[in-house]
Amino acid sequence: MSMLILILAVQILLLTTFASAGDRGDFARTMNPKRLHMKEKLTHLRVYWHDVISGPNPSAIVIKKHVAKHSFGSVTMIDNALTSDVPINPTLVGQAQGFYAGASQHETSFLMAMNFAFKTGKYNGSTITILGRNTIFSEVRKMSVVGGRGIFRLARGYVELSDILHICIVLSFHFVHNDHIE
Ligand SMILES: *[C@@H]1O[C@H](CO)[C@@H](O)[C@H](O)[C@H]1NC(C)=O
């Protein structure tokens, strides 16, 4: 008899659990990351970002000219090459696709929004999404890594910019991501 009561109690408990899940409309549920065997990796990565704004094949094109001082209101669409190694005789690793827009009326500061689409080796098909503020005359410039796909799934961290040539910027990434390959 007590066994029967126990079974009934368990069944009621299960029913209420399902009922409360149903109350939420079944469009959301939370899971324990440990059960999904999700582990995080820390990645450091360095690439060169080529912002070619002139010449026969520009990769950065002004869509909208600035409307005030400090490039405010300008919008430049980019499909910039990303390379490894030194800028002379570089190896193409992917493309930086997105835009930068003049976003400050008091200093030269750009809103940067780009996806880095990797095209080589184990990174082929993986992306990193960057959103950030670029105060181009500052000594230290950092932007946020807000996401990623492929081997960079769930990426978050930051990227530091440092100029080396007029059209080429060194980007040093530091971010964590899920090591699960989609
Ligand atoms: C990258 O992946 C694409 C699509 O799967 C494939 O066509 C291409 O050859 C790959 N490139 C390299 C360098 O592996």
Image (cartoon, helix red, strand yellow):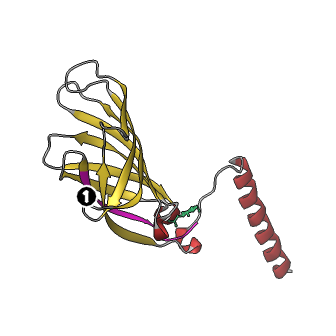
Residue pointed to by mark 1: 87
**Which secondary structure type mostly characterizes the magenta part of the structure?**
strand
Split into 4 quadrants, where in the image is the C terminus? bottom right
Split into 4 quadrants, where in the image is the N terminus? bottom right
The secondary element bearing badge 1 is classed as loop
Position of 66 relative to 11 (above/below): above
Stretch in magenta: 169-182
- Residue 4 is left or right of residue 72, and the answer is right
The quadrant holding residue 53 is top left
Residue 72 on image: x %, y %: 26, 25
Other-residue count near label 1 (Cα within 10 Å), few / some / many at <14 / 14–19 / ≥20: some
Residue 152 on image: x %, y %: 46, 63
- Residue 179 is left or right of residue 45, and the answer is right
Which residue is nearer to you in this view: 149 or 71?
71
Q: Residue at x 17, y 26 (%)?
A: 106
Which residue is nearer to you in this view: 129 or 86?
86
Mark 1 is on which residue type? Pro
